Amino acid sequence: MTTAHALLKTLGLTEDPRFIAQPSGPGIGQTFVVTENPATGQPIAGVKLDTRADLERVVGESVESFKKWREVPAPARGQVVRAIGEEFRKFKEPLGELVALEMGKIRAEGLGEVQETIDIADFAVGLSRQIPGQVFPSERPGHRMFEQWLPLGPVGVISAFNFPNAVWAWNAMLAAVCGNVTIWKPSLLTPLVAMASNAIADRVATKMGHPGVFRLVIGADDQVGEPLVADKRVPLISATGSCRMGKRVGEVVARRVGRVLLELGGNNAIIVHEDADLELAARSIVFGAVGTAGQRCTTTRRLIMHRSIAEKLTAKLVSAYQQVLSRIGDPLKEGTLVGPLINARAVEGYLHAVEAAKQQGGTVLVGGKKATVAGLGGHFVEPTIVKAPASNTLAIAMEETFAPILYLFTYDKLDDAIAMNNMVDQGLSSAIFTEGLRASERFLSVTGSGSDCGIANVNIGTSGAEIGGAFGGEKETGGGRESGSDSWKAYMRRQTCTINYGGGFALAQGIRFE
């Protein structure tokens, strides 16, 4: 608790009026939420919840803040984001440790998450000086035609517990340089990280003369979530979470003909071809399947191995997992490789999936049960490998279980492996390990007959994307794109403009109207 208090004090959370140092009562109440340390199961602090009236005030103020912020030149907006990135550099260590404390990912991953925020701020600064617009030749003499990109308005960001800092930043930093205000509704499982992160951005922007660009509402779905999604004053809702949640958001926003940016579930596979570097493949598979205790949307959940190397690769993985089992523990402790699941409900989901796999003919090769860590209670489970039965089918593997469970399958022909990769409802991340040009090009086929995922890697695992590329997936993953490349377009509206500088009356398509 001393460590927790020190972190909260360093990040200024103890001064926040919503902060409750010693909440009474468990879980989520009507007026407050208790956030727990998943490594111990003990409360860290409480947070007062916002109401529908609070949301109404925030949205109204955001509309007014947007009117002022959009008038600031984009390069000047970039300088604000640049200063925010510098402030996150200053607080990288305590904020990263708070991520580990509240979410449960190991300290190195917590620090890495904050680094993503720093990186996307750097990316956004560069973007602020090059938001482009094309010029088109007009068929009418004395006319000039071009397009420009304009700010949207207040952007609603709904984030999940597993990346309580970075996913907000992917949206907020780009939205800011594009001229928008962000209204952030974080997961109620990780509100402290959200409070600290938003406070850093808001403090910097306010000091530079731009208050209200970064807003935070912490509340239950009926009080905050549903009204935010339904509000016409919020032209874009960017939501990260489960497919079920995303479908609800998409339905509500579509009713008001708004925009959505959905980053939902993933059921990601790695194909290991017969000519693969098995040492490289094994290391990548273990990180992809075990990292963040299997609680990434890009977690490797299915392994599809060529039959000729399946036995050898399986032995490597079982050996590696047996080593990992001894490195389960306190995520803030040096040497820990696997932290806890987020809560008891997640543990139940893990146990249900393992049992279902057994009933469906799967064989548990390693793991498969709760893990006990000396001196800690917490929600720990053993990273698990399940071998599919001879039929090469396992119904539970078609579902996304947010836990460290890896299902093993085999194949003889590459086309069959690609079909297995594509057979799930989600389409986020995928990878193939091969030394062959033909196999890799078949997997990345430009005709679209290869991987159907938004991310397709060769000799790199499914997890750990860089911010420079657009991040997102297809099918029930939502189809949205965040972070790099031209993802900024989601936060702007396009306007086509034609100027008649010649003075003559002319119509397109040769139409005459005399």
Image: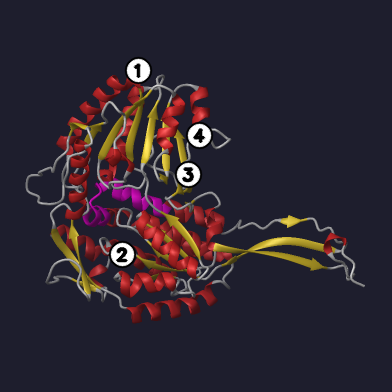
Judging by the rendered image, the residue that carries numbered circle 1 is 308
Label 4 and label 2: CA atoms lie apart by 42 Å
- The answer to which image quadrant residue 148 occupies is bottom right
Q: Is residue 45 magenta?
A: no
Judging by the rendered image, the residue that carries numbered circle 4 is 450
Q: Earlier in the sequence, mark 3 or mark 2?
A: 2
Tell me the tag on residue 196: 2
Residue occupying the point 21% across, 41% down: 356
Query: Start and end of the magenta stretch?
Result: 97-118
Residues at discs 4 and 2 in contact (Cβ within 8 Å): no
Judging by the rendered image, the residue that carries numbered circle 3 is 454
Q: Earlier in the sequence, mark 1 or mark 3?
A: 1
Specify whether 32 is left or right of 477: left
Q: Nearer the viewer, mark 1 or mark 3?
A: 1
Label 3 and label 2: CA atoms lie apart by 31 Å
Q: Earlier in the sequence, mark 4 or mark 1?
A: 1
Q: Secondary structure at mark 4?
A: loop
